[in-house]
Image (cartoon, grey):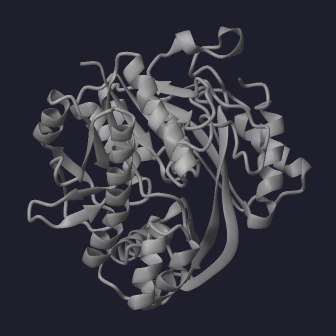
C-alpha cells in the first residue's frame, strides 16, 4: 500500500460545501493510487456548534473551575462528530470509510489532561480497516491513557496525530489541509500578498511554529522530522502544490535554484498578548543566585517563560498575558521588586541559513529603527532572531522586516 495521511482542520470542515471539497481531496488521492488515512479536527471555529472553543465555553458557563478530565471528555466529542460525518460523506461518494476514535486506534498518551503527549500507537485496528478496503477516518487531537481515561493533545493536536500516524504507518507523506495554500513568508492577515514558500526544512517550520505561525504545529514537524516523513501543507479549496516540508528537498528549490537552507531569512512570525517581567532587588540581589528560584517557582505554577535575559542586577523575561496574575501571586513569596507590564509582542525572523552570517541582527535592528519602533528585548538562535516590541507596533514591524529581507520575492 502507498499510504498517505490526510489531515483536515476545522476550517476545512466548517460547511457542507467545504466538506465536499475535502471529500474530493481524498478521492484525488485514491485516483493517484494512494491508500488514504484521514485525520479530522472538530468542525469550524469559536461560535460554530461543534467547535472545540464552543464546547469549552459551554463547560465554562456550567463551571468556571471545571476539571481537566471532564473537559477533555467533552471536547473530544468535536472530533468524533467530524469523523462520523466525514466517513459518511466518503461512503456517499462510493469510498467505503469508517470513523475511528483515538482510543479505538490505540493512540496511547501520558495522563496529562489537555496537553497529553503520544506515547505509543497500536495500529492493528487501523490496518484491519485498510485491509478490508475501508478508509479510516480518525479523530485527531485525542488519545487514551493506560487507565482508559480520554485525553487531548492541546492546541494543534490533530497535526500531531497525523504526524504520529504517518510515522507508525510509514506513510509516503502527511498532507495537512487548511484555509491557506501553504506556509507564507509572513502572516497574510498583515501582509495580504505574502507569497507561499514552496519548500521548507523541518527546522524552519519548527522555528516558525514555535514563534507564532499557526499553519503547522511544532510537535507534528518534530515527529515527522525524526523519521523523515515529508509534510505538505495545502489548501482544501484552492488547488496548488502548497508547501513541502522535509530534508534536503533541493529539487523543489526556489527561484534560480536556491537550495533549501541557503536563504538567510525564510519568513516572519509573531506572537501577541505578551507581558514583560522585570525583577530587581536590593544591593544583595544577584541574578545568577535568584534566577533558579524564580524559574523553579514559576514552573511549579505552570507558567512558561520566554525571551530570558539575565544581568548582574536584572532578571527579565516574557510570559503570556493570561498568566500575569498567577505570576504576581507566585513571586510574592520571594520578596523581590517585580514589575510586570502588558501590551507586548514578539516578532521574529526565521531562516536556517542565517547561522554564521554576519550583519543579520544589524539589519533587523536598523529596519525597526527606521520605523521608530522601540525594541525592549532581543534573543537569537542559529535559526531565528526575535525582538520584543509594543503590540500596537506589530503590523509595522512585520512589514518593515518583510521589506528588509525581500520576502515578497520568495516564490
Residue occupying the point 76% across, 65% down: 390
Which quarter of the rendered picture does the N terminus lie within? top left
Q: Nearer the viewer, residue 368 or 75?
A: 75
Residue occupying the point 37% across, 52% down: 85
How far across and how far down the image is residue 86, in percent? 38, 47
Q: Answer above or below: position of 21 versus 155.
A: above
Q: Name the image quarter holding residue 37.
A: top left
Residue occupying the point 84% across, 57% down: 373
- Report the side of 337 relative to 375 (left or right): left
- Report the side of 395 relative to 99 (left or right): right
Q: Nearer the viewer, residue 226 or 12?
A: 12
Q: Answer above or below: position of 348 versus 146.
A: above
How far across and how far down the image is residue 60, in percent? 43, 84
How far across and how far down the image is residue 405, in percent? 77, 32
Q: Nearer the viewer, residue 174 or 203?
A: 174
Residue occupying the point 41% across, 70% down: 295
Camera sees residue 214: no
Which quarter of the rendered picture does the C terminus lie within? top right
Q: Answer above or below: position of 142 versus 205.
A: below
How far across and how far down the image is residue 255, in percent? 71, 14
Camera sees residue 115: yes
Q: Answer above or below: position of 345 versus 138.
A: below
- Report the side of 50 relative to 118 (left or right): right
Amino acid at each position: 500500500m502507498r499510504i498517505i495521511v490526510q489531515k483536515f482542520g476545522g476550517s476545512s470542515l466548517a460547511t457542507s460545501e467545504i466538506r465536499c471539497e475535502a471529500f474530493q481531496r481524498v478521492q484525488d488521492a485514491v485516483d493517484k493510487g494512494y491508500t488514504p488515512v484521514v485525520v479530522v479536527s472538530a468542525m469550524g471555529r469559536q461560535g460554530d456548534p461543534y467547535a472545540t472553543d464552543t464546547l469549552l465555553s459551554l463547560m465554562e458557563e456550567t463551571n468556571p473551575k471545571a476539571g481537566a478530565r471532564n473537559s477533555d471528555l467533552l471536547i473530544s466529542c468535536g472530533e468524533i462528530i467530524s469523523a462520523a460525518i466525514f466517513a459518511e460523506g466518503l461512503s456517499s461518494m462510493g469510498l467505503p470509510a469508517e470513523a475511528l476514535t483515538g482510543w479505538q486506534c490505540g493512540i496511547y498518551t501520558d495522563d496529562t489532561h489537555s496537553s497529553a503527549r503520544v506515547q505509543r500507537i497500536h495500529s492493528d485496528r487501523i490496518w484491519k480497516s485498510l485491509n478490508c478496503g475501508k478508509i479510516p477516518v480518525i479523530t485527531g487531537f485525542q488519545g487514551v491513557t493506560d487507565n482508559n481515561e480520554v485525553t487531548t493533545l492541546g492546541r494543534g493536536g490533530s497535526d500531531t496525530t497525523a504526524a504520529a500516524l504517518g510515522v507508525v504507518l510509514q506513510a509516503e507523506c502527511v498532507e495537512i489541509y487548511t484555509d491557506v495554500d501553504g506556509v507564507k513568508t509572513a502572516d497574510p492577515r498583515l501582509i495580504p500578498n505574502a507569497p507561499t514558500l514552496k519548500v521548507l526544512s523541518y527546522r524552519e517550520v519548527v522555528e516558525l511554529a514555535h514563534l507564532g505561525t499557526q499553519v503547522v504545529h511544532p510537535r507534528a514537524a518534530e515527529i515527522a522530522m525524526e523519521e523523515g516523513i515529508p509534510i505538505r501543507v495545502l489548501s482544501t479549496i484552492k488547488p496548488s502544490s502548497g508547501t513541502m516540508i522535509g530534508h534536503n528537498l533541493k529539487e523543489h528549490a526556489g527561484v534560480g535554484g536556491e537550495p533549501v537552507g541557503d536563504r538567510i531569512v525564510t519568513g516572519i512570525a509573531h506572537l501577541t498578548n505578551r507581558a514583560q517581567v522585570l525583577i530587581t532587588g536590593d544591593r544583595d540581589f544577584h541574578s545568577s543566585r535568584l534566577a533558579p528560584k524564580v524559574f523553579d517557582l514559576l514552573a511549579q505554577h505552570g507558567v512558561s517563560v520566554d525571551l530570558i535575559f539575565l544581568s548582574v542586577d536584572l532578571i527579565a523575561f516574557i510570559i503570556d498575558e493570561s498568566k500575569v496574575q498567577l505570576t504576581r501571586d507566585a513571586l510574592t513569596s520571594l520578596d523581590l521588586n517585580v514589575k510586570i507590564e502588558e501590551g507586548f509582542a514578539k516578532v521574529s525572523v526565521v531562516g536556517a541559513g542565517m547561522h554564521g552570517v554576519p550583519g543579520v541582527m544589524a539589519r533587523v535592528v536598523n529596519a525597526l529603527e527606521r520605523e521608530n519602533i522601540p525594541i525592549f528585548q532581543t534573543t537569537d538562535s542559529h535559526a531565528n532572531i526575535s525582538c520584543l516590541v509594543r503590540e500596537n507596533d506589530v503590523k509595522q514591524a512585520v512589514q518593515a522586516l518583510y521589506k528588509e529581507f525581500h520576502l515578497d520575492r520568495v516564490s
